[in-house]
Image (cartoon, helix red, strand yellow):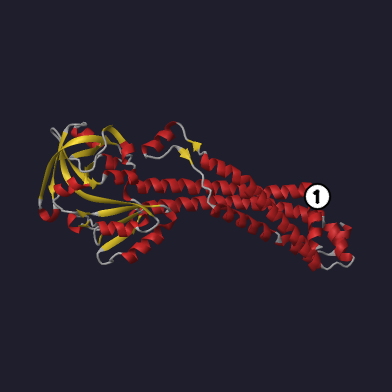
Amino acid sequence: MYLLLAWRNIWRNRRRTLITLASVAFAVFFSCMMQSMHTAAWGNLIDNAVRFYTGYIQVHQQGYWNDKTLDNSFENKPALQKRIASNPHIVTVVPRLESFALASGTDRTKGTLVIGIEPEKEDGLTNLRNKMRGGSYLKTGEKKVLLAEGLAHFLKLAPKDTVVLISQGYHGANAAGKYEVAGIVKFPSPQLNDQVVYLSLAEAQWLYDTGNRITSLSLLVDDPEKVETITGSLEQELNATQFEVMSWQEMMPELVQSFEIDRLGGEIILYILYAVIGFGIFGTFLMMTAERRYEMGVMIAIGMSRLKLQAVMFLEIIMLALGGTLLGLLLSLPVIFYLHHNPIPVTGNLAELYQNYGMEPVIPFSRKAAIFLRQAYIVAIITSVLGIYPLWFIQRLIPVTALRN
């Protein structure tokens, strides 16, 4: 009976009910849109950042991250890669051998970062092939190099020219080699664009006399949210005294800090939105109690207990909160799903900036269920808390005063 009374009461004044429903739905809709856009934008940024170079997880020889020398390299054993790849969440295992060298062109020399790679696996992680700006992509075992565009410009080299690399190899061995430039790649990072040289892994191992050794294994995972779990699992499986397993959060703490700062900024904006909508909802509750003061006074005067009247009022508030929340979800779901599959395109200079950093020039939207659930229950809680006021009003109501007004 209480439910029926509450249902009839909320539709006695359709205008007031529609205003309340619209206030709650507005809050849910815009909070879902903001959170969806923020989550997807950072997800894209993080994915591009880790695919740019480090990978989501890296496996090194113990101590390599603090002292990046060839002496801290380790044997590239197929059994090790197979063991790591057996984790169902790991998509790709990419071996690398990294060191430094002096690169010389016709009349200029510059210090460079030399990276030995397996071309196809590297392309699966960093999309290196899409960064080509001239020449041809590197082939496995080929005795050629890829030069970063800035470095090639400094050394005045083009595809089919020759570059000389001079360095120190494993355990102090001499390292020197002369290579044809296969192609030019462009990085959005000026630092990498001015100093990177790519060799095939086998050729880099020959140059630095490392045998079958590598400096790192970079891992691509299928679900970025499971990185910490996968890292912990690998740490238990691998020999902790020989290997260190690092997630992208450990390797790029500055990106984590930027994310936290931006997340806090987004949270503040959401709280402001919640506050604005909360005042709007509270206004409708004030209007509801003011309009029904006489009615409530009559009900109490003829013998209805305050507790029963409060129960009916509370059910009305719950119905309004749930109705507005569901309406907001129904409005936001199709919009977000459409924008997820059809992101908003970015044009002009901003689009060029996106492309320079290897990112698609669009504003993406996420459709994760947690986004909708979080906004729904927060707005529902706000509405329910504000609903305490009508209950307090009924408890304090004096029937005689209400009838006179």
- Which quadrant holds residue 250? bottom left
Task: Tell me the residue at 81%/53% (across/down).
Answer: 291
Quadrant housing the C terminus: bottom right
Q: Using residue 51 as the reference point, say whether residue 34 is left or right of it.
A: right
Residue 64's spot in the image, x, y percent?
24, 58
Q: Which residue is mark 1?
A: 13
Q: Residue furthest left?
A: 174
Query: Across the whole image, how many numbered discs are drawn on residues?
Result: 1
Asked if residue 239 can be seen in this view, the reply is: yes
Q: Nearer the viewer, residue 90 or 181?
A: 90
Q: Nearer the viewer, residue 1 or 297?
A: 1
In the displayed structure, 183 sits above or below 33; it is above
Q: Using residue 115 as the reference point, say whether residue 331 is left or right of it.
A: right
Q: Using residue 20 as the reference point, say whether residue 40 is left or right of it.
A: left
Q: Which amino acid, by three-letter code, is at mark 1?
A: Asn
Residue 2's spot in the image, x, y percent?
80, 62
